[in-house]
Image: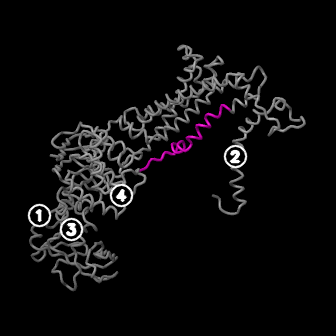
Amino acid sequence: MIEGAKWRRWLYFYIPLGTFVFWLLFPFYWMLVTSVRPDRELYRPWQAPNYTPFWTAHPTLEHITDLLTGTLFIRWMANTLFIACASTLISLFCGVLAGYALSRLKFRFAGALGTGIFITYLVPQTLLFIPLANIIRNFQLGDTPWALILTYPTFLIPFCTWLLMGYFKAIPRELEECARIDGATRWKAMLYIILPIAVPGILSAGIFAFTLSWNEYIYALVFLSSAEEKTVAVGVNSELVRGDVFYWGQLMAGALLGSIPVAFIYSFFVEHYVAGLTGSVKG
Amino acid sequence: MARVLIRNLNKMYNEVHAVKSVNLEIRDREFVVLVGPSGCGKTTTLRMVAGLESITSGDVLIGDIVVNELPPMDRDIAMVFQNYALYPHMSVFDNMAFGLKMRKFPRTEIEKRVREAAEILGIETLLTRKPRQLSGGQRQRVALGRAIVRHPQVFLFDEPLSNLDAKLRVQMRVELKKIHDRLGTTAIYVTHDQVEAMTLGDRVVVMKDGIVQQVGEPLDLYNAPANRFVAGFLGSPSMNFATVGLAEEGGTTHALGDGLRLALPAPVAGRLKPYLGQAVTLGIRPEDLRVVSGNAGNGLSFDAVVEVVERLGSEILLDLKVGSGTMVAAVEPTVPAKIRDQLRLALNADRLHFFDTSSEAAI
């Protein structure tokens, strides 16, 4: 920590930290306040009397109820959950196999393939959606969750491969060599030795992949049209802005409720996540 | 019969010729040590025997079967690695049982073998612990246990004691020897430590730059090294070397060097006859130098000035200035030597080593 006079600690540490935390968490606070604020307070200009921007004296649950009953919000949450889980599973499966192969096997085009995979990650989604839209239409996947489950891996797999490759590299080669001498085939060595040790890495790749799918907007916007198929991000935006009227209460409630699943998963796995990112396997 | 035969073994890594035509026969129940400096090819040779490296040319036979194409698990070997390579997510018991589980041994047999090995190594109380809860020495024992339960034809050791602290290393060395005695399995041991080589090996193989320098029993290599490298590698402190010219003076052959004027007795001179008039390298082990008084030494002695005195308790190491060069002498702890003392040191006639200056082979 910072030694010295107390004022130093405050100036160099507590105040910057406090400011930063405030900055980070303020949007969530605002979402929370806005979602419970009654309509008559929401559409009030700032010069109006009794203007209390940071809290409300009359909290109400009408926005949240309207969100849950008047729109297809629950259906959107279910859709997003399904799509995120499915694409995470597909990308993890491919990522583990690709990461292992690239980090362990010495075949001729290993380097080139690795680089090739990462380059695909660099192509922006805002560009890629155009040719992908064509493909989706040809396969008649438009307006189904499969349009997303099959396109999300285009950016999830490179990311998972990269993360897992780094993680596999940190596992000492001798462990597998020992397993091979002990009588395990390469496949069994991977299953019994490598995968259990790589669990933190796989968890962190999984969490990251889940978050990326959950928050994804462009492909969801382009490939899904009917209200029943939409994901939370797209649905909240398109259905709660009717014409030029912004239903702020429901919008904020939707945003808040939509962030809960990811926050929930993070809180459970945060230790594994950090361990996976720093990757420590010794002894 | 679990003998290992290595015939004309070669290993090329792209342009680098790491192992050059190695020929070795390791007999059944023998403990052979491959020793040499880093990069000499000893570990590569071991890994080729294990099947972890591909063989560029040559053959490896284990128990009379050519194993070149066999994967490691079919060669009936067990290996102990330098950094133990214990499976961190499994308990000690599971670590030792893994190999047997992979080969589908029945549960009762696995239990029996693991407990047997644990008893030999003294780790019965550690069976439920995970590797991270063990000390270095305990981990090494578990690694050994993992190899023992497989009852292989050959044990392969890749510098297993290098990661242990000095005291533990000495302890484990003794334990290893006892275990080998008890089990009698053929073993190939790789190390860079010449003390381990001398103490553990039934036979020692000294390697340098991918080539086998000499093979033989430890004391044979020590007393009759085949070349300058082997002479300088084994023994601590290492052998002293000095370039001397051979000249005939007054009927006896003399070795003349910087600060040295030695009259060589007849049998030694006879050996060196072809080198008369040329320079050769003289090698003297520190323990073969004696401090003598006055003019004793009958022509086989020289004067030196003490530069550093290192008292080890069991002996004294004297760093001496001889002419413009230096030598190290290991003498008894009772010798009264101080810095800047002028001493006379005598040599033993049958403890002189001579080497050709260009080929470095022993004469």
Label 1: how many Cα within 10 Å (few below 14, some 14–19, many 20+): few
Residue B359 position (above or below residue A38): below
Q: Where is residue B119 shown, x and y percent of the image?
A: 29, 55
Chain that bears disc 3? B
Element marked by disc 1: helix
Say left or right for B288 vs A61: left
Mark 3 residue type: Leu
> Would you name the residue on which mark 1 appears?
B274
Chain that bears disc 2? A
Q: Are marks 3 and 4 on the same chain?
A: yes
Label 4: how many Cα within 10 Å (few below 14, some 14–19, many 20+): some
Q: Residue at x 28, y 72 (%)?
A: B328
Q: Which mark is residue B137?
A: 4
Say left or right for B224 vs A145: left
**Mark 2–mark 3 contact, CB under 8 Å?**
no
Mark 4 residue type: Gly
Q: Which mark is residue B282?
A: 3
Q: Residue at x 22, y 51 (%)?
A: B187
Mark 2 residue type: Phe
Mark 1 residue type: Pro
Q: Residue furthest bottom?
A: B294
Residues B262 and B202: in front is: B202
Mark closer to the chain start, 3 or 4: 4
Q: Disc 3 to disc 1, how far (Cα)?
A: 15 Å
Q: Can residue B229 be seen at all in this image of the molecule? A: no
Q: Where is residue A93 shown, x and y percent of the image?
A: 46, 30
Q: Are marks 4 and 2 on the same chain?
A: no
Element marked by disc 3: strand
Q: Can residue A169 be seen at all in this image of the molecule? A: yes
Split into 4 quadrants, where in the image is the N terminus of chain A? bottom right
